[in-house]
């Protein structure tokens, strides 16, 4: 067996690619090398299988980790894994049903016709957009409007490509979209199907082409697209919005929009997965005497109680005050974590200095053995 190519290389993604990037990359390969689009092309079939194998490993966090650590050795022979060329097309369609938009069929995501008809449909190109969100928008989810330049359905012929709205059956393939060729091979005479050259596999021809679009069914235009971004997304994620990309020629299936997410930093709150972190610098008297302080959250300020004798390093967790979960990324609803530090005055006047001088002699200001021990235990936990 020939040596295997690196899975990341196969999909054309970096080793740090997100799940969404991997999925999107695989989807593109699957479209490019899909057997319906490359009938009889052995090389395309191998590429299609190779991409499926790479995706099968990289989409699974555990397999991906094993692969990162041990290479192909780490994932070979695993249950459900592919053993070289033993994989068949039906496996691929049933395993990645979400990608192919349904069991067995490829039509779901706008492919190239079901095998029942053999006719091909054009697919519009994808568009990319970048969107910058505030943490507040991440918390609630947001709908944004973009004006994009893209191929739109020709308004004159409504995408048919025909000036008078009429299309005719292709005379070469009789409307089937495919032609059959008989070739002589070492195994004897064999029949292969190829997309019809005359109609590009669509089965239709236009006599009187639309003067606006020249028969393509699409023209350059502007469109305002509305994109809903769900709550909980993170910097670097890529959302795929189906069907909002370029319109396809001849009323085919429109492409998608890939939305690249950027999240702005919040001025007070840090984000860690779906938790938010606030570093509270407490004044010394409140730490000693107790009281209440205001904490910023994504939906306004909240007051939290400070116990008397609060130690630096204490952590207060406000359950559910973090970011909401986003499906498929494995985080639940987050918390707001308040890390407490205590501000030690840096400059003192004479009077204040005297106050502290007095404290030095007081037993209450010297930690006991057990207090020293519990402080040590708490710090150990941080490094565990
Ligand atoms: Zn037109
Ligand atoms: Zn034809």
Image (cartoon, helix red, strand yellow):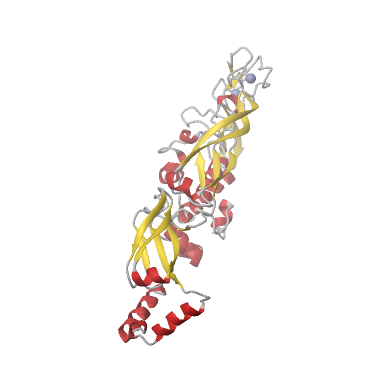
The picture places residue 160, in percent across and down from the top left corner, at 59, 20
Please determine whether, in this image, residue 157 is positioned above or below residue 335.
Answer: above
Please determine whether, in this image, residue 145 is positioned above or below residue 138.
Answer: above
Q: Residue furthest front?
A: 351
Tell me if I can see residue 76 in this picture: no
Residue at 55% x, 21% y is: 175
Between 186 and 330, the one lying in front of the other is 330
Q: Residue furthest top?
A: 164
Between 72 and 39, the one lying in front of the other is 72
Residue at 51% x, 42% y is: 240
Tell me if I can see residue 225 in this picture: yes
Residue 231 sits in which quadrant? Answer: top left
Residue at 59% x, 41% y is: 128
The picture places residue 70, in percent across and down from the top left corner, at 49, 67
Please determine whether, in this image, residue 65 is positioned above or below residue 109.
Answer: below
For ligand 2, the image quadrant comes to top right
The C terminus lies in quadrant = bottom left
Q: How many marks?
A: 0
The N terminus lies in quadrant = bottom right
Q: Is residue 228 left or right of residue 223?
A: left
The picture places residue 371, in percent across and down from the top left corner, at 33, 81
Q: Residue furthest left?
A: 370
Q: Is residue 229 left or right of residue 306?
A: right
The picture places residue 130, in percent across and down from the top left corner, at 58, 44
Between 175 and 61, the one lying in front of the other is 61
């Amino acid at each position: 067996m020939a040596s295997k190519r690196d899975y990341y290389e196969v999909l054309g993604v970096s080793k740090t690619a997100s799940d969404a990037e991997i999925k999107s990359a695989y989807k593109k390969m699957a479209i490019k090398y899909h057997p319906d689009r490359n009938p009889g092309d052995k090389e395309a079939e191998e590429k299609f299988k190779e991409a499926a194998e790479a995706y099968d490993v990289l989409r699974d966090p555990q397999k991906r980790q094993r692969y990162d650590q041990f290479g192909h050795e780490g994932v070979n022979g695993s249950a459900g894994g592919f053993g070289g060329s033993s994989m068949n097309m039906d496996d691929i369609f049933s395993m990645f049903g979400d990608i192919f938009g349904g069991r067995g069929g490829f039509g779901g995501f706008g492919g190239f016709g079901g095998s029942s008809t053999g006719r091909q449909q054009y697919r519009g190109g994808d568009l990319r957009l970048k969107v910058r969100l505030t943490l507040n928008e991440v918390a609630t989810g947001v709908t944004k409007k973009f004006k994009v330049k893209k191929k739109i359905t020709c308004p004159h012929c409504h995408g048919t490509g025909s000036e008078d709205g009429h299309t005719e059956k292709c005379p070469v393939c009789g409307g089937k979209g495919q032609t059959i060729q008989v070739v002589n091979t070492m195994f004897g005479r064999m029949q292969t199907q190829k997309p019809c050259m005359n109609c590009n596999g669509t089965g239709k021809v236009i006599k009187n082409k639309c003067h606006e679009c020249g028969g393509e069914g699409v023209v350059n235009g502007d469109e305002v697209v509305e994109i809903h971004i769900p709550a909980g997304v993170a910097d670097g994620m890529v959302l795929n919005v189906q069907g909002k990309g370029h319109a396809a020629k001849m009323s085919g299936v429109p492409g998608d929009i890939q939305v690249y997410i950027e999240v702005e930093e919040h001025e007070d709150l840090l984000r860690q997965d779906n938790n938010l972190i606030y570093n509270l610098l407490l004044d010394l008297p409140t730490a000693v005497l107790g009281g209440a302080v205001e904490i910023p959250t994504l939906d306004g300020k909240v007051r939290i109680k400070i116990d008397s004798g609060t130690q630096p390093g204490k952590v207060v967790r406000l359950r559910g005050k973090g970011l909401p979960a986003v499906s498929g990324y494995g985080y639940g609803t987050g918390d707001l974590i308040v890390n407490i530090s205590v501000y030690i005055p840096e400059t003192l006047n004479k009077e204040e200095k005297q106050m502290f001088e007095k404290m030095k002699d007081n037993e209450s200001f010297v930690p006991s053995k057990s207090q020293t021990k519990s402080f040590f235990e708490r710090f150990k936990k941080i490094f565990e």
